[in-house]
């Protein structure tokens, strides 16, 4: 099996969210359902100096995350119906919407927030790696939409050979939990997973 | 039918409950609730079972500066999804794809939007109440023609005003071009000059650099790759030039290529930074000129100025090049070193107190700028939307001037960067028989105090005074109540039917300004229209021709401007003259044929429409601003009186003598920091302690795209406030807050973030103005708080100069 996955270059990303909106458009997702989410991670402190001027060590970067199609997905383990499954040929994690009962256990289990409950359908939905587009020789819609060319998609081993295997970057969880098929390109501000010096600055947007 | 269509069309209530949840957006629901638009028509599904799919090329025509290719996928005549450019060569810079941003990718929700205007309507309640009744196009055009004739007869054509509107930017043969063609044939209308985006910088810099191109714009951003230091004053392409083909893409490409050291000076930690910069220097809004003077002090004291350049190319740096008309010690060096009229030495310590930047940092920045050869120094244009914006724009360009970083590879003028443009032909609009012109920002004054306005007090052009007040407004794709400063004041003026007697609004949606119309005309969206358009004005070194093929038929009873203007022309007996016998499509074909005759490389119209955008790249020569002047200052003298770079401007010296200014306003021949009203040094800070600036949010383009729930979800409208200021007021991230000053009050969410300097708040402009019964804006519209007081020189918009207070609701 060739496991497919994403590369997310946080040194190129400007947090514009075109990936999120192009995914929403292509997959007809309503407000409240976001197969791709852009996390704004940042922190830093301000000091007022004696002369009234300011010093600071502020940092911010964005991490665009969809489903990482993990090697050891937490969602499939949590799924009581077998609807959530890993496709044998390319490792994409998919939800069989005709089987899913909408219990939302996968949503609770996934540390990346990938499974998204649809109020309208009354069951789970999620990033499917645009397998329909892949079959036509196209890339995932998010990758082809990225204005800054910060996203790539392909066999994860090729991406790792090209970009290394960092996935332990805040605000993402420790990758040993699920072995995500994602490589994060770091930037000058990157903090490790578990970092406590920053926080997700846009909790209502993700 | 696709679920998204059900969401937007069939279930408007569900959509609205979301809009309300966003608190800042409660307004949109309030507007729509009082309109006949509650009833949502069904999409034309006559071919529903045929399953005919189609893909057509189009583009996003909004005023972000960029322009992006869109591919619209339709099924049975309904847009199902939107993709972007997939042509060219991603590995060859210049031929890269022009990828649309999140706005363009959500554009189908603008087409199928419950706010769409569907048929002509006329006002039935009081003006501004938003009550309308449906009328036929014949009735509407009779009414419009009668009103135009009436105003021309009773007052004169100069009482008719075509208001500012950039909601649809990029039409070449339709839209406002079509409207202006008609009005120019029927006697004309009162002109305006300048614009809300660059009103001050474009007015001010010609005093320094002359009015000859390329000085009005700078070097291309591609020159960054030839530079050793990049210094950006308020320049934020990641949020203002979002296209994946234009300025931000080119900027990042150039920065990466050279890993050029980058320093960004901004009150906000913007999305252009995020670690791509080497250093962020936070600064108090409106104080950039003080920083420049502190830097200039170090450059002069430490002999880091390029004296040979200043002697040869510039006027007024020191005694040697000071013009005869100037007072003794009227030169820049004296001003900086404390020998000028104010007697204040502009030391780094002096600048630190004003700007909030530590002394050591100012000295270090000055040494970096003084020693980097070459340095690319650039400014954005938010910083000139301040009460002292002309001074700031002229001050920042002093840094490349003082260090001789001009006209050489890797340099820039300190202005906005230059962009290439492909000259796609336009529908000829003819000349306006009315010559009088007002500054863009003074139109409300031309309603209420036209008789007081003169060239010397209010910047009138081509006339010394006005013959008439504005009595009729025609607004095409504009949002004048929302986007002009001081919305409450604008609304009050427009409500008075004895002032402006008739207002026509032509738009796609029921905007806050459309509520003030007497006559509403529904325009088609550009996906229902044919066009060939060019790149915008922020495309970097790419020049592009975009085909636009109608993806769907015109919806409801919507008609394009060219179409209804042709019918309007008939009511003036000039239909033939107006159309020259051509339909709109025939104009597109005719003008394109003209373009093909000039450029043999251009594909045929059919091929363009089939294959997508035609891309060209700027020639390598001509990318460095003032290169010709640097090489030969005699032959390529600038358009200033001296032909040189005028640090000391004799024209401003004259204007300062002749113009009448309100108390506190000054115009000076030298660029200098001026403390203004509602700066952080204004005593009014006792009552309103925080500065409030606007910015271009990623979630819309000015006020366009505001009524898209998917975008409101992705980019929450929140006021940026530093944790220090928030904690002092008990405000937490996500709290509902009220922001107010003596001009109004608005409600919005708080975004508590370290990404903004203490003492300053920032709010994305363009949210829809939605006053409740008490006049409190529930929509988060920043112009509830901004001032209509104009700037001294350009009479422009200081919409980022505001003092306010904030509290939890």
Image (cartoon, coloured by chain):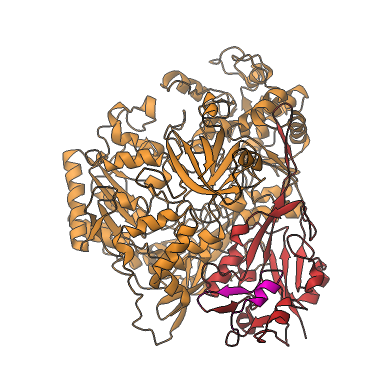
Figure quadrant of the N terminus of chain B: bottom left
Bounds of the magenta segment: A100-120
Q: Specify whether residue B426 is in view.
A: no
Q: Quadrant of residue B594?
A: bottom left
Q: Where residue B781 appears, x then y in whole percent?
A: 45, 47
Chain shaded orange: B
Compared across the picture, whether B789 is left or right of B523 comes to right
Check the rendered structure and report the hue given to chain A: red
Residue sitting farthest toward the top: B328
Compared across the picture, whether B442 is left or right of B497 comes to right
Q: Is B488 part of what is drawn in magenta? A: no
Q: Specify whether residue B182 is in view.
A: yes
Q: Is residue B320 above or below residue B172?
A: above
Q: Is A115 part of what is drawn in magenta? A: yes
Q: Which residue is located at x 46 percent, y 23 percent? A: B655
Q: In this view, does B184 lie above or below B245?
A: above
Residue in the foreground of this view, choosing between B608 and A68: A68
Residue in the foreground of this view, choosing between A111 and A62: A111
Residue in the foreground of this view, choosing between B7 and B339: B7
Compared across the picture, whether B195 is left or right of B37 comes to right
Q: Where residue B727 appears, x then y in whole percent?
A: 63, 41
Q: In which quarter of the image is residue B34?
A: bottom left
Q: Quadrant of residue B439?
A: top left
Q: Which residue is located at x 34 percent, y 46 percent? A: B773
């Amino acid at each position: 099996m060739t496991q497919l996955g994403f590369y997310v270059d946080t040194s190129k990303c400007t947090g514009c969210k075109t990936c999120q909106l192009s995914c929403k458009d292509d997959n007809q997702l309503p407000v409240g359902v976001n197969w791709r989410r852009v996390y704004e991670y940042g922190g830093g402190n301000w000091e007022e100096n004696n002369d009234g001027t300011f010093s600071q060590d502020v940092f911010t970067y964005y991490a665009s995350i969809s489903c990482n199609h993990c090697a050891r997905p937490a969602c499939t383990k949590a799924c009581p119906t077998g609807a959530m499954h890993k496709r044998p040929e390319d490792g994409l994690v998919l939800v069989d919407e005709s089987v899913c009962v909408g219990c939302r256990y996968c949503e609770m289990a996934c540390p990346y927030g990938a499974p998204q409950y649809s109020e309208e359908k009354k069951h789970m939905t999620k990033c499917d790696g645009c397998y329909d587009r892949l079959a036509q020789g196209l890339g995932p819609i998010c990758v082809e939409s990225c204005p800054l060319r910060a996203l790539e998609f392909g066999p994860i081993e090729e991406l790792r050979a090209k970009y290394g295997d960092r996935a332990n970057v805040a605000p993402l969880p420790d990758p040993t939990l699920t072995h995500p098929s994602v490589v994060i390109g770091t930037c000058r501000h990157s903090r490790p997973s578990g970092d406590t010096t920053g926080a997700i600055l846009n909790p209502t947007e993700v | 039918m696709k679920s998204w269509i059900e969401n937007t069309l069939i279930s408007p209530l569900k959509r609205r409950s979301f809009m309300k949840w966003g608190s800042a957006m409660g307004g949109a629901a309030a507007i729509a609730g009082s309109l006949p638009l509650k009833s949502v028509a069904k999409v034309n599904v006559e071919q529903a079972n045929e399953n005919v799919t189609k893909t057509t090329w189009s583009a996003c025509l909004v005023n972000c500066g960029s322009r992006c290719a869109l591919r619209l996928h339709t099924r049975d005549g309904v847009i199902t999804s939107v993709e972007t450019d997939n042509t060219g060569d991603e590995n060859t810079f210049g031929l890269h794809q022009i990828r649309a941003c999140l706005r363009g990718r959500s554009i189908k929700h603008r087409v199928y939007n419950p706010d769409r205007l569907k048929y002509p309507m006329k006002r039935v309640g009081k003006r501004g109440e938003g009550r309308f009744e449906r009328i036929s196009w014949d009735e509407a055009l009779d009414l419009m023609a009668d009103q135009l004739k009436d105003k021309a007869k009773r007052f004169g054509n100069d009482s008719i005003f075509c208001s500012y509107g950039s909601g649809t930017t990029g039409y070449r043969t339709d839209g406002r071009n079509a409207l202006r063609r008609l009005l120019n044939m029927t006697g004309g209308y009162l002109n305006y000059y300048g614009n809300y985006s660059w009103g001050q910088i474009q007015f001010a810099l010609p005093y320094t650099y002359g009015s000859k191109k390329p000085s009005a714009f700078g070097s291309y951003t591609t020159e960054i790759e030839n530079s050793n230091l990049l210094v950006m004053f308020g320049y934020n392409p990641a949020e203002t030039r979002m296209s994946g083909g234009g300025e931000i893409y080119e900027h990042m490409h150039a920065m990466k290529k050279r890993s050029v050291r980058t320093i960004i000076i901004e009150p906000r930690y913007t999305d252009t930074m995020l670690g791509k910069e080497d250093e962020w220097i936070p600064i108090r809004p409106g104080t950039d000129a003080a920083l420049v003077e502190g830097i200039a002090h170090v450059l002069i004291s430490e002999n880091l100025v390029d004296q040979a350049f200043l002697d040869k190319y510039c006027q007024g740096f020191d005694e040697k090049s000071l013009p005869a008309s100037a007072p003794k010690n009227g030169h820049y060096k004296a001003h900086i070193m404390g020998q000028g009229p104010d007697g204040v030495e502009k030391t780094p310590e002096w600048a630190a107190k004003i700007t909030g930047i530590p002394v050591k940092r100012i000295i270090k920045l000055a040494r970096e700028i003084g020693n980097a050869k070459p340095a690319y120094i650039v400014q954005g244009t938010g910083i000139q939307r301040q009460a002292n914006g002309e001074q700031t724009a002229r001050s920042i360009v002093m840094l490349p001037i003082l260090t001789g970083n001009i006209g050489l590879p890797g340099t820039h003028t300190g202005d906005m960067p230059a962009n290439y443009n492909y000259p796609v032909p336009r529908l000829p609009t003819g000349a306006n028989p009315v010559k009088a012109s007002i500054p863009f920002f003074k139109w409300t004054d031309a309603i209420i105090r036209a008789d007081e306005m003169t060239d010397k007090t209010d910047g009138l052009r081509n006339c010394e005074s006005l013959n008439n007040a504005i009595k009729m407004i025609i607004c095409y794709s504009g949002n004048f109540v929302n986007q002009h400063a001081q919305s409450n004041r604008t609304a009050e003026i427009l409500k008075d039917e004895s002032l402006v007697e008739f207002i026509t609004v032509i738009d796609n949606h029921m905007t806050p300004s459309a509520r003030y119309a007497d006559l509403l005309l529904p325009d088609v969206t550009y996906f229902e229209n044919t066009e060939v358009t060019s790149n915008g004005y922020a495309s970097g070194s790419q020049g592009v021709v975009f085909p636009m093929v109608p993806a769907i038929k015109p919806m409801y009873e919507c008609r394009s401007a060219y179409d209804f203007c042709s019918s309007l022309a008939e009511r003036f007996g000039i239909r033939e003259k107006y159309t020259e016998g051509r339909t709109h499509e025939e104009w597109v074909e005719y003008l394109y044929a003209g373009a093909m005759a000039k450029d043999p490389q251009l594909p045929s119209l059919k091929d363009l429409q089939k294959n997508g955008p035609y891309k060209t790249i700027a020639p390598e020569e001509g990318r460095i601003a003032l290169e010709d002047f640097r090489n030969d200052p005699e032959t390529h003298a600038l358009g200033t009186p001296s032909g040189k770079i005028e640090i000391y401007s004799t024209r401003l010296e004259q204007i300062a003598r002749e113009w009448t200014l309100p108390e506190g306003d000054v115009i000076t021949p030298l660029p200098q920091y001026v403390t203004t009203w509602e700066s952080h040094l204004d005593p009014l800070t006792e009552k309103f302690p925080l500065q409030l600036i606007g910015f271009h949010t990623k979630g819309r383009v000015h006020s366009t795209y505001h009524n898209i729930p998917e975008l409101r979800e992705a980019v929450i409208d929140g006021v940026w406030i530093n944790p220090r200021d928030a904690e002092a007021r008990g405000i937490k991230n996500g709290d509902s807050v009220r922001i107010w000053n003596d001009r109004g009050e608005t409600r919005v969410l708080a975004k508590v973030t370290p990404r903004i300097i203490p003492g300053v708040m920032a709010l994305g402009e363009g949210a829809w103005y939605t006053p409740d019964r008490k006049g409190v804006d529930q929509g988060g519209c920043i112009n509830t708080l901004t001032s209509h007081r104009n700037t001294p020189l350009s009479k422009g918009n200081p919409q980022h100069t505001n003092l306010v207070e904030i509290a939890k609701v």
